[in-house]
Amino acid sequence: MSEEIFKKIVAHSKEYGFIFQSSEIYDGLAAVYDYGQLGSELKNNIKQYWWESMVKLNENVVGIDSAIFMHPTVWKASGHVDAFNDPLIDNKDSKKRYRADVLIEEHREKFQQKINKEVEKAQKKYGDNFNEQEFLNTNQRVLENKEKIAVITERFQNALNNNNLDEVRQIIIDYEIVCPISGTKNWTEVRQFNLMFDTKIGSVTGDASVIYLRPETAQGIFVNYLNVQKTGRLRLPFGIAQIGKAFRNEIVARQFIFRMREFEQMEMQFFVKPGEEMQWFEFWKQKRLNWHYAMGFNKNKYRFHNHDKLAHYANAATDIEFEFPFGFKELEGIHSRTDFDLKQHQEFSGKKLQYFDNAENRSFTPFVVETSIGLDRTFLMILSNSYDEEIIEKEGEESGTRVVLRIPPALAPVKVAVLPLLKKDGLVEKAHEILDLLKFDHNCQYDEKDSIGKRYRRQDAIGTPFCITIDHQTLTDNMVTIRHRDSMEQERINITDVEKIIAEKVSMKNLLKQL
Ligand code: GAP
């Protein structure tokens, strides 16, 4: 998918009320977005899918909702005050600022793309006889590019792990990475920049003290670990899930809702016995990938990517990356966070955050495996996967091109549109009867304006899985036309079957059952 499609998705999101630039009438606020009438529905459905998959389906996972403001020492203890930084570099000609690590990663991705092209070419050439694994292990050009990836990765990892910013810059120089705007290699030094927003709490200026807007929801879980464990009488292993806002002063905030300054995270901390964390790390990796697969999009668009540099708290970390229109990028992180956070909070608060194991008759600090996914990025992933332009040559449909959002029905913002063929002869009243039948279970739309073809197009464009059309015959035989979004198939069904057919197809339960 290309940048051009991406631009279309952004424009489409605005045109149909999914996403608006924040404070748009004041020319907007960079990297901050508002969700419109359909966007907030889709967002709520994604939250429901995640929350229920975690809290309902796992008897040992519970959910909380902690405050955004936290005691400032939390962020000292967590390491965010000292180490939550991005390495930044400026191009002196364009005056544009970049994340140095992202520039290098994107350069490295070019070698991977070359490999993918070689594979594609060979696939076409050899057809059914093509053995991809053998090709990857033997083709000269593939091997050269693999070697290039290995060399740059090792150098980059060493530089990051040693916090050697001069070396990070040197990699950019040596690989002749240019600024995408000016096209020059005229780079400044690399500097670290802390991403936390701060503000003041307290009414009197002199008494006010600095607090931070949380940069991750996870710390709200850690500081409540003992409260939840004790009041919920939970035994290891168990998880605490949370959905909530997080804030980061992203300097390089582009690509729409991919990187925002205010965003939402869906995080789960899974507390385990020390020594068992790797087994649970593998368990959650697979479980989370299955959650993505169950939505039914192309599996080739997801991949694992191990971190080049482990965060200050982790002993293993991987990302689930998704192929966004601008390339493979992080969608979700799965981290083995050891006992770092709980130990730090014990030290800084002076309160014990331990677990007493009855069977072993001893106390210890649990280890933690975390799954952390951005709600907004999941939203963008679903839009990117769903957006389709299709040429129509079908009877009963207006010819031309239709834009259709193939959103999984359980997540679609509107499940069904009820459309009287005409605004007279009792069709409107009949349509409202059907609407009244469905509205308690589903988000529905009623539309009586324009030709039926135009109305179908409008519903396709917002991803509505079903349209129900009421015509004159309905009044005599109690039958309606149900039109399916993806196939554009139309069937006559009895009104008494409408509820059942729709409920079955848009059911969150059926989506969850696939997990
Ligand atoms: N508690 C661990 C943590 O916060 P992270 O990799 O920094 O880890 C987790 O963030 C997820 O949050 C990312 O995979 C991404 O989906 C989302 N995320 C992070 N920063 C974001 C931003 N600026 N805008 C939108 N989503 C973001």
Image (cartoon, rainbow, N blue to C red):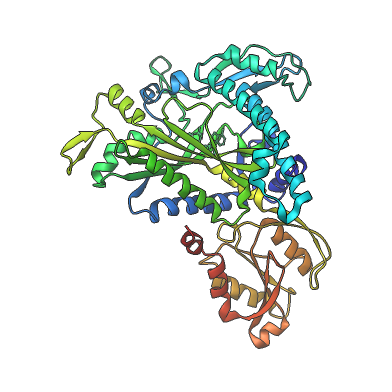
Outermost residue, left side: 361
- Residue 423 location (% of width, % of height): 73, 73
- Is 67 located above or below residue 393 in the figure? above
Question: 285 and 4: which one is in front?
Answer: 285
Looking at the image, residue 427 sits to the left or right of residue 303; the answer is right
Residue at left offset 72%, top offset 56%: 128
The answer to whether residue 66 of the structure is visible from this angle is no
Quarter where residue 370 is shown:
top left
Q: Position of residue 140 (x, y in %)?
A: 72, 34
Horizontal side of 432 relative to 312 (left or right) equals right
Quadrant position of residue 312: top left
Residue 20 position, x and y percent, is 66, 42
Report whether 489 appears left or right of 290. right
Is 307 drawn above or below residue 499 in the view shown? above
Does the image show residue 415? Answer: yes
Location of residue 291 in the rendering, given as x and y in whole percent from the top left corner: 50, 52
**Quadrant (top left/top right/bottom left/bottom right) for the N terminus:** top right
Asked whether 430 or 274 is in front, the reply is 274
* Residue shown at the point (73%, 60%) measured from the top left: 458
Q: Nearer the viewer, residue 199 or 116?
A: 116
